[in-house]
């Protein structure tokens, strides 16, 4: 019986420490997730600007497909501004993955354009 009380107190202290650590971890996840989304948007936007310039140099300013992508980034940024505080971490991660996927797709399309211009 004398051993039960210290063991119980130790278990309660361990659970309290674990709970505090978990709360601290979760409070750091949201800012990190938001920062990751913004970094992905910035990277895609920077690449889109370069792509726009490349396409305008080749095709002029007619129906540049980059404009739609730039508008989509703006919509994503507005969504983030309005919903970042209440969005689930899974939603933020999905937006980040979507932006990264769009950037990968853009890179593939630009590579095809470059190959077509080179005559391959």
Image: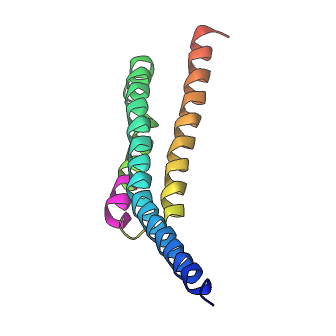
- The answer to whether residue 63 shows anywhere in this view is no
In the picture shown, does residue 61 fall above or below 5? above
Horizontal side of 18 relative to 4 (left or right) equals left
Instruction: Give the magenta-colored segment's residue range.
Output: 76-84
Percent x, y of residue 118? 59, 9
Magenta-colored stretch includes residue 81: yes
Percent x, y of residue 86? 39, 71
Q: Residue at x 39, y 18 (%)?
A: 57
Q: Which sits in the foreground, 37 or 6?
A: 6
**In the picture, residue 106 is in which quadrant?**
top right
Q: Which sits in the foreground, 24 or 88?
A: 24
Percent x, y of residue 115? 62, 15
In the picture shown, does residue 92 fall above or below 46? below
Percent x, y of residue 96? 50, 49
- The answer to whether residue 82 shows anywhere in this view is yes
Q: Give the quadrant of the C terminus.
A: top right
Q: Which residue is drawn at 44% across and 54% down?
A: 33
């Amino acid at each position: 019986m004398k051993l039960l009380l210290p063991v119980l107190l130790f278990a309660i202290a361990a659970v309290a420490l674990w709970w505090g650590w978990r709360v601290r971890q979760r409070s750091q996840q949201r800012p990190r997730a938001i920062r990751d989304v913004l970094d992905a948007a910035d990277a895609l936007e920077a690449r889109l600007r370069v792509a726009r310039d490349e396409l305008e140099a080749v095709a002029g300013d007619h129906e540049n497909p980059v404009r739609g992508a730039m508008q989509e980034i703006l919509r994503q940024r507005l969504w983030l501004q309005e919903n970042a505080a209440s969005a689930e971490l899974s939603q933020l991660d999905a937006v980040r993955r979507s932006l990264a996927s769009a950037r990968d797709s853009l890179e593939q399309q630009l590579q095809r354009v470059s190959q077509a211009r080179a005559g391959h």
